[in-house]
Amino acid sequence: MAEIVREGNLFHLRNDRISYILCVMPEHALAHLYFGRRLSRLDPDQVLRHAGSGDTYNFTLQECGLDRLPQEYPSFGLGDQRVGALKIENADGSTAADLRFVSAVIEQGKPALAGLPATFGDNCQTLRISMKDQQTNVQVELLYTVFEDCDAIARSAKITNGSLADIRLTGAMSLSVDLPDDQWDFITLNGAWARERGVYRRPLMPGHQGVSTQCGASSLQQSPFLALARRETSEAQGEAIGAALIYSGNFLAQASVYQNGSTRVMLGINPDDFSWLLQPGDSFQTPEAALVYSAQGLGGMSRAFHTLWEKHLLPRKWLNAHRPVLLNSWEAAYFDFDEEKLVSIAKSAAEAGVELFVMDDGWFGHRDDDTTSLGDWTVDKRKLPGGLGRLSDRVRALGLQFGIWMEPEMVSPDSDLYRAHPDWAIHIPGRAGITARHQLTLDLSRKDVQDFVYQAVSTTLKESRAAYLKWDMNRNFSNIGSTALPVDQQKELPHRYILGLYSVMERLVKAFPNVLFEGCASGGGRFDPGMLYYVPQFWCSDNTDALCRCRIQYGTSMFLPPSTMGSHVSAVPNHQTGRITPLQTRFAVALGGCFGYELDPRKLTEEERSALQGQVKYAQDSESTRLHGGMYRLLSPFEGNDTAWITVSKDQKEAVFTYVRGQAQANAAPALVKLQGLSPEKRYTVQETGQTFGGDELLFSGILCKVDGGNAASLLYTLKAVEA
Ligand code: DGJ
C-alpha cells in the first residue's frame, strides 16, 4: 500500500518497499532526510547532525546554515552555495528566493499537470506542499507522489508570481534531492545517431557531472536519465537510484558532489538559455521527474522504471493491446517507389503473415530525395496516381493494415508551405537560415502552426484510413527565434515548442484513439518518457544491425521497457554498417521490442521467406512475455563479447531468452549464463531443445549457450514451466 504519513514536522512517503522522508525545519526551510529502503521511522537528528557535521548544527538562514542543510527545493542567493533548483530574477533585479513551508495537503491519487505529460493512477498518494517567499510573494507548490505498485516517487514544482510586478524564472528544476554521501557510481546513457544510449558508468566525483541538451529535443546524444549505483552494485544486486525526466525538450540531469561528500541530484528543463516571464498571477509548471530506488541492482531499477511507465504513463489503450507485426518500406525502397511496387512489397509481406504495412518517407509533394516538400502533405500523383485512398485500399485488400510516415514538425525551404509562410519556420530575422537535412523546423510555439500540423495529420490519417502513424522528427534547433514572441521572451521558445508539440499530440491521440502512433527522431532522438505519454512505441534507432542493436536496446532498457522499442529485422549487408549477420540473430534481437521488418521481402531467398512465416508466428505468440514480462539483462555488450537478456512472464510460467555472441571465438568454452526472474521452484522445458531444467539450476548454475561458428551467432530459447 502507498501512504503518506505526517508526524509533526515530518512527512513520510512510503509503500511496502521504499520510503522518502522530508521535514520542515524550525525556520520553515524544507529538508530532505531520506530516500531508500522502507523504514518504519526515522529520527531526523542523526541525519541532520551528519549534514551539519557536528554535535550541534545551525541551519538558520542567519548563520549561512542552508549551505549544509539537505534540501528539497533549494534556491539561490541566501547562503546555500550549491547549485539551486529555483532561480528567479525578482522585480528589484535580485535573484534570491527564500522559500519557507506554508502548508501541506495529502491527497489520494495523482493530479494531472496542465499541458504536460505526467504519470497518473489511483493506487498512489500525493503530497502537495506550499512554500512561499514572504518578501516577494513568490509561491512554489511541490508535488510528491508515491505509488503502491512501483518503487518510484514522482515530483514536480509549480511556481506562481504572487507579487504585483513581473518576475523572470531563469531556472526551475523538476526535482532536486540531497543525498548524504557520494559513494556511488554515476551512470548516464550517451551516444550519437545510429549509436543511441550507450551505457557509461564512472565513479561520482566532487563537482558537477551530468548530461544536458540544447538542441530542442531530448536528443540522440543524451537521455533525460541518470543513475547512481553503489560501487558493488551489479545488475542483480545492490543499491541503485535512478532519475528520469518526463520531458522531450532541452533538459539537465546532474549530480553534484559538495563538501563532506553530500550529493545533490537535479533534473529539469536545462536552465542554460532558459528564461520565462511571469506576470503577476502567472504560474509556471515544471515537467515531472521520477526517482526510483532499487535494492536489487540496476536490473531492479530498470524494472521499477518499466513498471512506472507501463502502469502510470503509457497510453492506456495500447498497454496490453496487440502490437501488429509491421513491415516498413524505408530500407526496402527509400524514396524510390510507386503504387505497384509498394503493393507488391505489401503482398509479399502479407504472405509471410505480416499484419501492418507502413509507407515511409517519399509519398507527398515531389519528394524524390530529402531536399524538398516537407510541409506539402498532398500525395505525389506521379508515384501514387490513385491517391492515398487507393493505395490503402489495395494494401488492406491483402489483409494488412495500412500505416503511413509523416514528419509534421518540419518544412522544406522548397515547399509551397514555406513559400506561403516563411515566418512559420524557427529563425532569427535577418540571419541566413540554417538548414539541416535540407529542412527547417516549424515554430510549434505558434497556435496557427499547431493548427496547421493538426489539420495536416488529421487529413492524412483520414484520407489514408491509416491504422498507424510514424511521427518522425529529423533535425535539431538552430537560429533559435520566433517572430511570434516579443524580444524579451525569445528564451521561452524551446519550452513553448515542446508545449505546442504536446498540445498537438494530445489533440491527435484523442481524435484518433484507434491509431497506433510510433515516435521517431532520426531513430531514437526523442525517445523519452515525455513522448511515451502519447506514443506507446518509438523507433529505437536507425541502426538495424543486429550487433549494434544489442548495445542500443540493452542501453535503452536501462529506463525504457521493451514494449516501447520499435525493433525490426533488416536486410544484409546491413545498410548502416555493411555487416552480414545471420537472419536468426537479426530475428532474435528484433524480438527485444515491438517486432517488425525493414526490408524488401521479395528480395529474400525462398528459404528466408519461409523462415519469415515462422518468425511472425513466434513474435505473435511470445508477444505478451516479450513485451510485458519482466526484463532481466544478463550479459552486457558494453562489458564483453556477449549479450544476453531474458523476459519472464508475470506468472513466471514462460520466458524468452536471447543470447548473442558478437565475434566468433576459437577454442572458447561456451558461456554458462545464469538466468534471472524464473521461479526456483518450477521446472522449465526449453522448447527449442526439449531439455528440462530446474528453475534453481537455471538461476544459480546457468544455461549452457553453445552456438554455431561465425560472427553474431545466437540462441533464442523459449522456456515453459512444466505443469505439475
Ligand atoms: C529517419 C527515420 O529514422 C527513418 O526510419 C526514416 O523514416 C527516415 N527518417 C525517412 O526520412
Image (cartoon, rainbow, N blue to C red):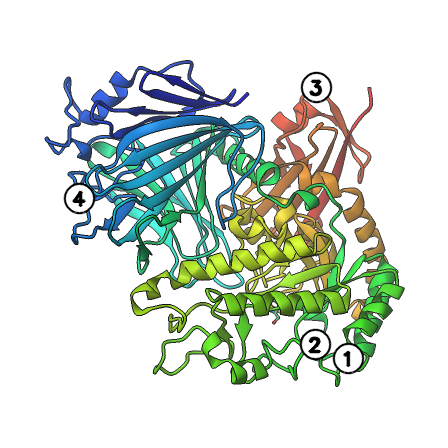
Tell me if label 4 and label 1 are in contact, CB under 8 Å.
no
Question: Is 315 drawn above or below residue 43 in the view shown?
Answer: below
Residue of label 3: 681
Find residue 40 and report its horizontal and vertical position in percent: 42, 14
Mark carried by residue 363: 2
Callout 4: CB less than 8 Å from ligand 1:
no
Of callouts 3 and 1, which one flags the residue occurring earlier in the amino acid sequence?
A: 1
Under mark 2, the amino acid is Trp
Callout 3: CB less than 8 Å from ligand 1:
no
Find residue 55 and report its horizontal and vertical position in percent: 15, 17
Of callouts 2 and 4, which one flags the residue occurring earlier in the amino acid sequence?
A: 4
Under mark 3, the amino acid is Glu
Left or right: where 91 falls relative to 280? left
Mark carried by residue 384: 1
Q: Tell me the element at label 1.
A: loop
Mark carried by residue 77: 4
Give 625 or 615, whichever is nearer the viewer: 625
Q: Tell me the element at label 2.
A: loop
Left or right: where 595 falls relative to 687? left
Under mark 4, the amino acid is Gly
Q: For the C terminus, which image quadrant?
A: top right
Q: How far apart are marks 2 and 3 (CA)?
A: 55 Å
Q: Distance between the residues labelled 3 and 1?
A: 59 Å
Tell me if label 2 and label 1 are in contact, CB under 8 Å.
yes
Give 403 or 611, whichever is nearer the viewer: 403
